Amino acid sequence: MISFNLQAKHDKDAIVVLLASGQKHDRFKNELEKGEVYPVLEGTKVFLFVGLGKADKLSLTDLRVQVRKALLSSYLSKARSVEIVPHIKNDASIIAIIEGAAIGTYVWDKYRSKDKNDRSIKDKQITIIAEPKKVFTDALTICQGVSLTRDLVNDNADTVTSEYLEKIVRDLVKGNKNIRLEVLNRKELKAKGLNLHLAVNQASNKEPKLVIVRYEGGKKGEGYTAFIGKGMTFDTGGLNLKPTGGIETMKIDMAGAAAVCGILKNVLNLGVKKNLLFVLGIAENSIGSAAYKPGDVITGYAGKSVEIGNTDAEGRLVLADAFAYVVKNYKPAKMIDLATLTGACVVALGFDHTGLFSNCDELARQLIDSAKETDDRAWRLPVYAELKEYIKSPIADLKNTSSIKGGGACTAAEFLHQFTEGTTWAHLDIAGSSYAEGSGRMYFSFGATGAGVRMLTHYLLHN
C-alpha cells in the first residue's frame, strides 16, 4: 500500500532518504555514489540513505531503478512500514518514485511456498513524502492496472483460459451503467463467419471467444477508439510446432489481451470521458488431428481468403477477424491493437521497446509522446505500399507469411493493415517488451511487464 504525506513523520520502521549529487546530510560528510546505500540504525529504526548519482545526469528510469533496489534491500527486509523522502519534489520525479515502488517491487508468488517469517514487499506500508495530488493518486491507480495485466500474463495457461478472461472482464465492468458487453463463443463465431479465428482454435478443447466491451464515457455520437488485444492463451505454434527454448513462455501470448484488461481497469477507475471499445480475441493454438494445416486456404469475416503459410503465424489471423468484425459492426474512429506478434520485432528492437506501426502520422506521434512520458517505450517502424506485395498468395487473396526473408515485423503489420478498411490504426508489437526473463531488466522483475498499459492510459488522458 502506498500513501502520501506532506510532512515527514519518521514514525515508520524504516526511512529511505534519496540523495542526488550535491545533497549532503548531517549524518555523513561524503556524497554517495549512484547505487550506493548507507544504512544507519537507531534502535529498531533503519535510516537508509540511497545515492542517485549526479543530479544533472539522473534519468527518471534510473530513479525508478534505484527506488526499487532500495525497497528490495535486505536492510528493509523486516520493516513493515517505510517512509520515502524524495531528493526533489517535482511531479515527474514523484511519479517515477511511485512507479519504482509500485511497479518495481511487484511480486508474482502465487505458486511459491509461503514462509510465515517472510515479510513480502506486498505487505509493507509505503509512505512518500509528497503532496497528495490527483496526478499522484492517478499514477498509483494506473500502476494497479499494470499489476492486473502482469498477474494475468504470469499465471498458468490452463488457469487463464478464455472463460477466465471473460470473467475478469465481467467482474471489472459489473454494475457500470456506461458499459455494453458482447461475447461471441464458438457457435456465434461460426454463425457470423469468423473462420480465421475458429481455425486457429480448432485443435483446442477450450472455447474460442471474441469479447467486446463498449464503454460510453464520452459525448453521444463521438467516435470510438478501439483497443484490440491478441489473446492466445497458449501458443504451441500448431503443426509448425515451436521448439524447446521457444515454447516454454508461450503462456505470455495473451499479453495483448491482458493489457486491454489493464487499460479497461484504469479507464473505469479514472472515469475517462471518451467512447471506447475494449476487444479481446481469445484462442488457444494447440496441436492434434483437428489442427489447421499449412497450405489450407481459409476465408475470414472480411470475405478475404488467406493461405496458411505457417500455423505459428496465428495471432494475425485472430486479429484479422477481430478487426473486420469491429470495423463493420462498431465503425470505430481509431483502432489500436496490442499483440505479441513477431520474434522479428525482438530482433529489430530488443526487449526494451515496443514496435509501433501506424497508417496515421498524428496518431503515431501521440503514442510516441505518451511512450516517452511514461517510460513505456515504443519505437516507430515503417508501413509502406510495397509490403502488400510480400503477403500475396498465388491461390488466395493473402498469405499469413511473407515471400521474402527479413522485415517480418513489418510484413506481419501489413497483413493486419489489410483488415483496417481505411480506419485510422496503430499496431503495437509487444513481443519483446511484454516479458522480462532471467533476473529481469530495468525496474522489472522476472515475468510480465504490463507493456502498453501506462502508454495507452496516458494517451487517453492527454489526447
Image: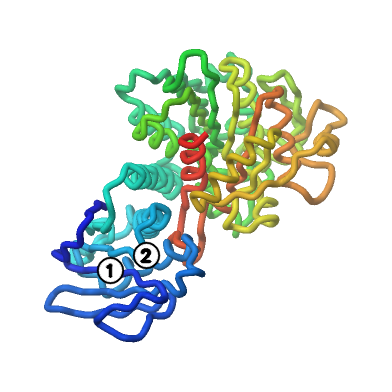
Label drawn at residue 382: none
The percent coordinates of residue 285 (x first, y second) are 58, 39
Which residue in the structure is indicated by mark 2?
67
The percent coordinates of residue 242 (x first, y second) are 64, 51
- Amino acid identity at mark 2: Val
**Residue 103 visible in this rendered orientation of the protein:** no
Identify which residue is drawn at 23% across, 74% down: 47
SS type, badge 2: helix
Instruction: Kindly check if marks 1 and 2 are in contact, taking CB atoms under 8 A apart as contact.
Output: yes
From the viewer's side, name the closer residue of 424 and 184: 424
Q: In the rendered view, would you say 5 is above or below 190?
A: below
Identify which residue is drawn at 75% across, 28% down: 306
* Image quadrant where residue 265 sits: top left
Dot 2 alpha-carbon crowd within 10 angstroms: few under 14, some 14 to 19, many 20 or more: many
Which residue in the structure is indicated by mark 1?
16
How did the renderer colour the structure? rainbow
**Residue 403 visible in this rendered orientation of the protein:** yes
Dot 1 alpha-carbon crowd within 10 angstroms: few under 14, some 14 to 19, many 20 or more: many
Question: Relative to residue 428, is residue 177 drawn left or right?
Answer: left
From the viewer's side, name the closer residue of 75 and 118: 75
Q: In the rendered view, would you say 66 is above or below 301?
A: below
* Image quadrant where residue 137 sits: top left
Question: Relative to residue 346, is residue 249 drawn left or right?
Answer: left
Identify which residue is drawn at 66% across, 24% down: 423
Name, please, the residue furthest toward the bottom: 29
SS type, badge 1: strand
Q: In the rendered view, would you say 255 is above or below 270?
A: below
**Cα–Cα gap, marks 1 and 2:** 9 Å
Which is more N-terminal, label 2 or label 1? 1
Name, please, the residue furthest toward the front: 22
